[in-house]
Amino acid sequence: MPIIESTYKPPFWAKKSFVSTVFSGLARTVNGVVQTRERIELEDGDFMDVDWSYAESPSDKVIILLHGLEGNAQRPYITGTAKLFNENGIDACALNFRGCSGEPNRLYRSYHSGATEDLDAVINHILEKDKYSEIYIKGISLGANMALKYAGEHNDLPKELKGIVAVSSPCYLKGSCDALMSLKNKHYAIRFLAHLKEKLKPKLEQFPQDIFITDFNSIKTLVDFDDVYTSKAHGFKDALDYYEKSSSLQYLPSIIIPTLIINSLNDSFLSAECYPVKEAKQNPNLYLEMPKYGGHVGFIDKKNVYYNERRALDFVNQIISG
């Protein structure tokens, strides 16, 4: 499809990428969302916790929300979307990826950018409820890459899945990792790595046959973490193999349902390859919007409803109305 011309105009103080990104990640709060937790038991013996919030009246529509790296279902970028959709008659099912719900997961593996098998398990679980005739997915950052990969790698998507919205998506993981490890993003990389290593620590004692203290101590960068843990725990040869096989960019040409990607041009976490202009122009189901501003998941707008949240609702409503 033709590239969508964005209408996003942030407040003057939020035009800088760093300001919008940090404010949105650390200062924003969303009130008024009541979540009910459900535990989904997975076939491999692990579990995922999902947090439901509901429209005022019974709905046959639900949006699945996927968080970013080291996020959870209580992050404002998740609850903000859930609140807006609930207010507009659509239920929300917010995932907590393995190990992200406040309780360690049971297995050595956890979650990663391409773990679409877990998204598939949740969709199947929702379909078993026999309540929803329409399912939508909105992914943020890591969750956005996962949603796009899921949509493009399956030839037999459930008929109930009607559309995808991907925000601040690192479609090309190697490029995004390089961007994140650049000098300008050093403070972000340090923060992410600290969280990841802290979560990995208990697995040293729980799974001594899988990881040694020398391995753990060798982790100095995000690539090291993916080399030592992410790749080995999830069946990849190394970090590069993980990035190559899990990047959603290669799957975009195969997407057959309406899909909107919103990646801001001043997102310092994204490389040039994360703006799939060619793929969008060649796939009639793929819509690409590239606002000038917004940073990484920092689309600050009026009344504490973010621009990407309004756009997601508009996009879904367009699909519903046909």
Image (cartoon, grey):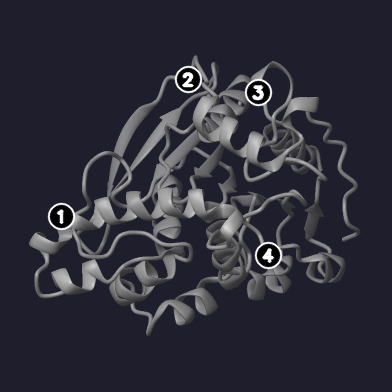
Q: Name the disc covering residue 202, or none.
A: 1
Q: Tell me how far mark 2 sits from mark 3, CA to CA.
A: 13 Å
* Marks 1 and 2, the one that precedes in the sequence: 2
Type of amino acid under label 2 = Val
Which numbered disc flags the more N-terminal residue, 3 or 1? 3
Circle 3 SS class: loop
- Give, as a three-letter code, the residue at label 1: Pro
Label 3 neighbour load within 10 Å: few <14, some 14-19, many 20+? some
Question: Which residue is at the far front?
Answer: 183
Q: What SS does tag 1 mark? A: helix
Q: Amino acid at mark 4?
A: Ser
- Horizontal and vertical percent for residue 303? 69, 16
Q: Earlier in the sequence, mark 2 or mark 4?
A: 2
The disc at residue 88 is 3
Neighbours of disc 1 within 10 Å: few (<14), some (14-19), many (20+): few
**Left or right: 33 in relation to 135:** left
